[in-house]
Image (cartoon, rainbow, N blue to C red):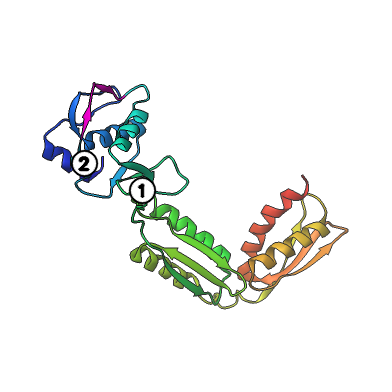
């Protein structure tokens, strides 16, 4: 239950609806009881555009059961009082709603801060994947007015674009980038020759798919030679990049036999 509505309700000294079977009594009731009932039935949070919105009164002519489609009746009663319930996040009917008397009012969503970080030693897309995983863990309990962080790779410039609504979270992600974007350990930058035995499809086809996928990723180019008699790829790549190439091959190889 929203803290504003709860505080308003305590001030009015009236009981909140406790379950979907609650009955609202006839008479002059505060709007807060309707908002509370709607929130109870839909299991969605309500945020009000005014701390006094819940104190407004309306006239209920006869007792109203919250069950049996009561949420639709509640929306109608709220509209009769000039109050609209609007989804906070566009296009999402399920989720927190904005209670407002102004049809043009929009909830005060947090604003994105944008940073563009050009990487020196690693490709941007794998770094974006790491950041997305970190954000998924850190941003599980965002408030209804907050927004999830976004990470976009720009292979052309070798950059990561971070959009974040929290200065604290943004600094955490920037620190992760800085820690990861380091020169490779001495000796690992030297090219090594690796082989890959094709499990599905044709070796030449896999060589083309690998080349396309790696170019999209950006970074150091690969040297790939298909060996037709053994259906094997010979790949020359800096040592520290081989695990990434191997992971990409694990994704591409099974798709060729379908």
Q: Judge by depth and name the residue closer to the eye, 212 or 145.
A: 145
**Classed neighbour count for the residue bearing mark 2: other residues with Cα under 10 Å, few (<14), some (14–19), many (≥20):** many
- At horizontal 31% and vertical 33% (from top left) the residue drawn is 38
Q: Quadrant of residue 221?
A: bottom right
| Span colored in magenta | 58-66
Q: For the point 45% across and 64% down, which residue is it?
A: 163
Q: Quadrant of the N terminus?
A: top left
Which residue is label 1 attached to? 103
Pointer 1 local density, CA inside 10 Å: few below 14, some 14–19, many at least 20 = few
Residue 183 in the image: x percent, y percent? 53, 77
Residue 90's spot in the image, x, y percent?
A: 45, 49
Picture residue at 62% right of the left edge, 76% below the top: 189
Q: How many marks?
A: 2
Q: Nearer the viewer, residue 196 or 172?
A: 172
Quadrant of the image containing the C terminus: top right
Residue under the point 34% across and 42% down: 84
Which of pointers 2 and 1 lies earlier in the amino acid sequence? 2
- State left or right for residue 45 relative to residue 238: left
Residue closer to the observer: 143 or 39? 39
Marks 2/1: CA distance? 17 Å
Query: Is 62 included in the stretch rendered in magenta?
Result: yes
Residue 35, above or below 170: above
Residue holding disc 2: 54
SS at mark 2? helix
Indicate which label's residue lies in the foreground, 2 or 1. Answer: 1
């Amino acid at each position: 239950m929203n803290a504003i509505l709860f505080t308003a309700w305590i001030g009015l000294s009236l009981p909140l609806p406790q379950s979907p079977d609650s009955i609202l009594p006839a008479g002059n009731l505060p709007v807060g009881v309707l908002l509370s009932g709607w929130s109870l039935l839909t299991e969605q949070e309500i945020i009000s555009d005014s701390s006094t919105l819940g104190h407004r009164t309306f006239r209920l002519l006869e007792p109203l059961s919250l069950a049996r489609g009561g949420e639709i009746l509640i929306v109608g009663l709220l509209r009769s009082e000039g109050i609209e319930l609007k989804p906070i996040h566009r296009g999402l009917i399920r989720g927190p709603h904005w209670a407002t008397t102004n049809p043009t009012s929009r909830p005060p969503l947090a604003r994105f801060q944008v940073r563009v970080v050009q990487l020196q030693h690693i490709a941007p897309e794998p770094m974006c994947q790491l950041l997305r995983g970190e954000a998924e863990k850190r941003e599980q309990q965002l408030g209804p007015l907050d927004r999830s962080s976004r990470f976009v790779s720009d292979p052309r410039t070798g950059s990561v674009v971070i959009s974040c609504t929290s200065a604290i979270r943004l600094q955490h992600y920037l620190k992760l980038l800085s820690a990861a974007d380091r020169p490779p350990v001495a000796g690992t930058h030297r090219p090594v020759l690796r082989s890959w035995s094709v499990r599905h499809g044709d070796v030449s086809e896999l060589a083309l798919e690998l080349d396309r996928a790696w170019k999209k990723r950006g970074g150091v180019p690969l040297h790939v030679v298909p060996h037709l008699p053994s259906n094997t790829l010979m790949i020359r790549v800096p040592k520290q990049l081989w695990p990434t190439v191997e992971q990409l091959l694990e994704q591409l190889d099974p798709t060729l036999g379908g």
